[in-house]
Image: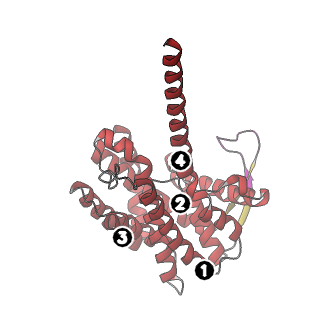
Amino acid sequence: MFGYITINKPELKIKDYNRYHSFYCGLCRTLKEKYGFLGQMTLTYDMTFLILLLTSLYEPKEEHSEHHCIVHPVKKHAMLVNEVTQYAADMNIILAYHNLKDDWQDEKKFKAYVGSAALKGKYEKIQQQYPRQCKVIEESLMQLGQYEFSNEKNLDLVSGCFGNLMAELFLYREDVWEETLRKFGFFLGKFIYLLDAYLDVEEDIKTKSYNPLKWIKDDENYEEFCKEMLVMMIAEASTRFEQLPCVQDGEILRNILYGGVWNEYNKKQNKDQNKDQNKDLNGKEKVEKNDRSI
C-alpha cells in the first residue's frame, strides 16, 4: 500500500531533487545500520516524505556524509540524516512488519512468514520505545481486518482506519502542532488507502479479494466519483499542511502534495486511455477490412 507519496521529478528543481535524494539515501543507510539488509529492503518513498515534513517543521540538526552503497557501488552518494531519520526508520519497520504479517495470514506467502519472523524481535524493541504509535497502528489494522472480513462497503469507515494509522505516525511530538499533524496524517492516510483501492480494483475483482470499490465499479459515474473523492482527501491534507510553518523544503513538499501523489493515478489514466485508443483502432481496421472484402 506504499510508494505513492513521492516527487513529481520533471517539475522539481535539480537542487531540490538532490536534497530529496540525499534524505532518501540517508534513510536507506540508517535502515541498514539499525536493522540490517532486511531493514534496508523495507525502504519506501513515503517515509522520505515524513522526514522532509518533520525536518521542515522542527528543523533538527542535519548531518551530511557521502558513502558507497550496493545500488551505487562506484560513485559515492550524498546522504542527509537527523533525529527524524531515526524515527522514520523505526516507523518504517513497524509498517513493514505488519504488512508482512498480514501477507502471511491472508495469503500464506512463505517469504512473508520468514520476513515477519525476522522482524519480530526488532518490532518488539521499537514497541517499547514507541508504545503509543504501535498501539494505535495495531488497533487500526485490526479494525481494518474486521471490516475486510465482513466486506464493509462504507468507504469512510475503511479508509478511516488507515487514516487513524497515519495520523499517529505523523505525530512525532505531542506539542502545539499535534492537532494539525493528526488531521494532516488522517486525510493523507485516507487518500493513500482509497488510491490503492482504485488502482487495484480490477485485479481484486479477478482474484475475489476485498476491495471497497468493487461494488460500485460498474456505476456510470465511477471514474468521476473516484477522482472527486481523491481530490477531496488530498485537498483536506494540503489545507492542514499549509497551516504548518514549513518554510525549509516547502517547494519539495508542495511538489509531492500537489503533483507527486498523483503519479500512479495518472499512469493508470494514460494506460486506460491507450487501451481505449487501441480498441478503437482495431475496431476501425476490422470495419475497413470487411468493407474491402465486400
Disc on the earlier residue, 4 or 2: 2
- Local crowd size for mark 1, using a 10 Å CA cut-off: few (<14), some (14–19), many (≥20): some
Tell me the tag on residue 244. 1
Residue occupied by mark 4: 269
Q: Is 69 inside the magenta-drawn segment? A: yes
Instruction: Name the mark nearer the viewer: 1 or 2.
Output: 1
Amino acid type at circle 2 is Ala
Q: Distance from label 3 to label 2 (Cα)?
A: 18 Å
Residue occupied by mark 2: 89
Q: Distance from label 1 to label 4 (Cα)?
A: 32 Å
**Residue 76 position in % (x across, y down):** 76, 47
Residue 181 visible to an observer of this rendering:
yes
SS assignment at label 2: helix
Amino acid type at circle 4 is Gln
Disc on the earlier residue, 3 or 4: 3
Residue 58 falls left or right of residue 118: right
**Residue 207 position in % (x across, y down):** 31, 39
Q: Is residue 149 above or below residue 54?
A: above
Instruction: Name the mark nearer the viewer: 1 or 3.
Output: 1
Q: Quadrant of residue 261?
A: bottom right
Residue 146 falls left or right of residue 283: left
SS assignment at label 1: loop
Residue occupied by mark 3: 136
Instruction: Name the mark nearer the viewer: 1 or 4.
Output: 4
Disc on the earlier residue, 1 or 3: 3
The structure residue drawn at horizontal position 37% and vertical position 52%, both measured from the top left corner, is: 220
Q: Nearer the viewer, residue 220 or 268?
A: 220
Q: Distance from label 3 to label 4 (Cα)?
A: 35 Å
Q: Which residue is farthest front?
A: 294
Range shown magenta: 65-75
